[in-house]
Image (tube, grey):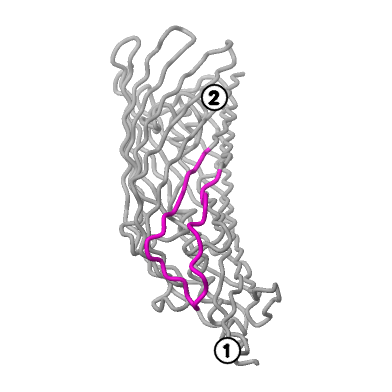
Amino acid sequence: MARHLKRAALAATAALAVGGVTTDVRGAGFALIEQGASGVGNAYAGAAAVAEDASTVFFNPAGMARLDRAQVVLAGHVLNVDTKFQNNGSIVPGGFPSGGNGGQAGDVVLVPNLYAVIPLNDRMRFGVSLSSPFGLATEYGDGWVGRFQALKSEVKTLSLNPSLSYKVNDQVAVGVGFSVTTLDATIRRNQLLQLPGPVLNQGTAQFGGSDTAFSFNVGVLFSPAEDTRLGLAYRSRTELGLEGSMSVNTSTGVPIAAATGPITADLTLPASLSASLYQGLTDRWALLADITFTTWSDIQSLVVRPGGANVGSSTQLDLHFRDTYRFSVGANYQLNDAWKLRFGVAWDQSPVSSSQERTANLPDNNRTWLAVGFRWQATKTGVVDFGYAHLFVRDTPIDHAAFPNQAQSGRIVGEYKNSIDIFSLQYTYMF
């Protein structure tokens, strides 16, 4: 009996390690760029150079130097994530029935942002942002064909980012900030259990972990001419040491004590470097552009370590993430004193490079943005921004076994159809 429980605990530990690592990477590897609604209509082209409202605290703190009045920005984004899988020869372990395609694995998610900027004197500004820079929500229907690799994956972050800017002269401003980021992850999946007797058991394994860590960001804004701005912004890596617990239940809901206990895992949220341009063309037209580089190659493999005496040994998952680029261009048209129209396109590269390294927690691929929006000066102190973007995602093949031996996790083979719609609204109040 003890030998069977020990074997179940070892298998469950490995399963949770792979599932937990993959999910955390999904939260880190899909950064939520939805930081302020005023940039959505431009597909965030020129985000580090526009400096139009307090959301510049996130994109480039040096941009606060352009804000002459204290202001507060409240923004909200509704993300409609459409993720559907089509099976094409997946293998379910243990002789269990194959199962369906999992239904709608995406979700409708609300992402809020809050920003504030206060002038301290003629040259210095203080700002703060409260936002969610990383996130994930995927959930498949019970009994789907890939249930031994993923059922539910959820990652939530909350980041507080106080910042300072200093206006060196009329052409140059600099900014610096630091962030306190909290991350919570929850992962659930089915697990093949070898309990006493000849029949394998389809159990359920769950992992939860969290941590809080610090990072910094710096930026510079160069204005060589009245209608020309160049922005450069850097956000550092965030080193997290997740601590949490795992639990495993049999198919009848009976907990396995030997497979329950603490787990730790190290996770790096990558650094990013953005270069942006804002160029006024006429009294009505302006051109915007941006290139952002993100160091996803920091994540090559991840290790989950069980802390209890009965839950097995450390497990390593090789991910082989690649560095990525994001390119965007946009335009603004000043219709009149009260209304401004926005347009933008972007190409966003995925850190997942092949179908073998793609997971059901992260069915991600390169995507193209098409975006529109407007800015309405409603009153002397109030501004409303709205943005809409549709993200076209390439057809996404997957051929993944979470273990070297697919007898434990099965193999997911098929193709995902993904798309994302973003609806963003923002209100800015100036004092």
Q: Residue at x 41, y 65 (%)?
A: 412
Q: Which mark is residue 373?
A: none
The stretch drawn in magenta includes residue 83: yes
Q: CA distance from mark 2 to mark 1?
A: 76 Å
Q: State how many labels appear.
A: 2
Whether residue 76 is visible: yes
234 to 77, vertically: above or below: below
Q: Amino acid at mark 2?
A: Asn
Q: Which residue is mark 1?
A: 198
Q: Residue at x 37, y 61 (%)?
A: 88
Crowd class of label 1 (few under 14; some 14 to 19; many from 20; radius 10 Å): few
Give the residues drawn in magenta, as a range: 79-107
Residue 50 in the image: state x and y as whole percent.
40, 26
Crowd class of label 2 (few under 14; some 14 to 19; many from 20; radius 10 Å): few
Q: Which residue is mark 2?
A: 121
Foreground residue, 254 or 25? 254
Q: Amino acid at mark 1?
A: Pro
